[in-house]
Image (spheres, helix red, strand yellow):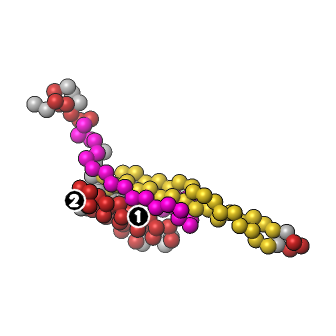
């Protein structure tokens, strides 16, 4: 008999992640808020379904997320040989990065501050059944 099943822990360990691959892109010239609008739609979905959704979204952030999702699926194939139809988006988040401070000239010698925000995107895909 199985060690974990004999102790009543079989179901807990069946739901564990078998394989997880990750892709990260840093210093994206886009605010984290714009990225989050897109990633909230694909969180928890199957990779192929998420790619189909991203392909038809009208936002530039969707192109960024799509590129990183393809990279995470490719990493999973390289590490464990798992194809993209068996994967799902287990974790996806956007963090704020450095903010570039720039100036915009205004009337009478004044200057207004412009904050050019950047962000980091992390995507993890797994073949787990959660």
- Residue 17, percent across and down? 28, 45
Number of numbered discs on residues? 2
User: Mark 2 sits on what residue?
Assistant: 81
The reply to whether residue 78 is in sight is yes
| Distance (Cα) linking label 2 and label 1 | 18 Å
Residue beneath the point at 26% across and 61% down: 78
State left or right for residue 88 relative to residue 116: left
- The quadrant the N terminus occupies is top left
For the view shown, which residue lies furthest in the right direction? 108
- Residue 96, percent across and down? 57, 55
User: Mark 1 sits on what residue?
Assistant: 68
Residue beneath the point at 47% across and 53% down: 93
Describe the element under mark 1 as helix, strand or loop. Answer: helix
Q: Residues within 10 Å of mark 2 (few under 14, many from 20)?
A: few
Rendered view: 21 above or below 1: below
- Residue 61, percent across and down? 50, 67
Residue 107 quadrant:
bottom right
> Which of disc 1 and disc 2 is earlier in sequence?
1
Query: Within the magenta stretch, is there residue 25?
Result: yes
Residue beneath the point at 41% across and 56% down: 123
Residue 109 quadrant:
bottom right
- Give the camera-side residue of 4 and 27: 27
State left or right for residue 9 relative to residue 104: left
- Give the camera-side residue of 104 and 39: 104
* Rendered image: mark on residue 99: none
- Residue 129, percent across and down? 27, 47
Q: Which residues are magenta?
A: 13-39
- Give the camera-side residue of 44 and 99: 99
Residue beneath the point at 31% across and 51% down: 20
For the view shown, which residue lies furthest in the top direction? 7
The reply to whether residue 37 is in sight is no
Describe the element under mark 2 as helix, strand or loop. Answer: loop
């Amino acid at each position: 008999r199985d060690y974990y099943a004999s102790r009543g822990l079989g179901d807990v360990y069946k739901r564990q992640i078998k394989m997880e691959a990750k892709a990260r892109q840093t210093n994206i010239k886009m605010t984290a808020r714009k990225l989050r609008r897109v990633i909230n739609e694909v969180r928890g979905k199957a990779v192929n379904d998420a790619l189909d959704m991203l392909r038809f979204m009208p936002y530039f952030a969707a192109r960024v997320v799509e590129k990183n999702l393809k990279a995470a699926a490719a990493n999973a194939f390289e590490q464990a040989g798992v194809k993209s139809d068996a994967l799902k988006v287990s974790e996806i988040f956007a963090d704020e990065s450095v903010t570039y401070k720039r100036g915009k000239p205004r009337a009478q010698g004044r200057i207004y501050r412009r904050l050019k925000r950047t962000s980091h995107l992390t995507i993890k895909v797994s073949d787990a059944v959660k």
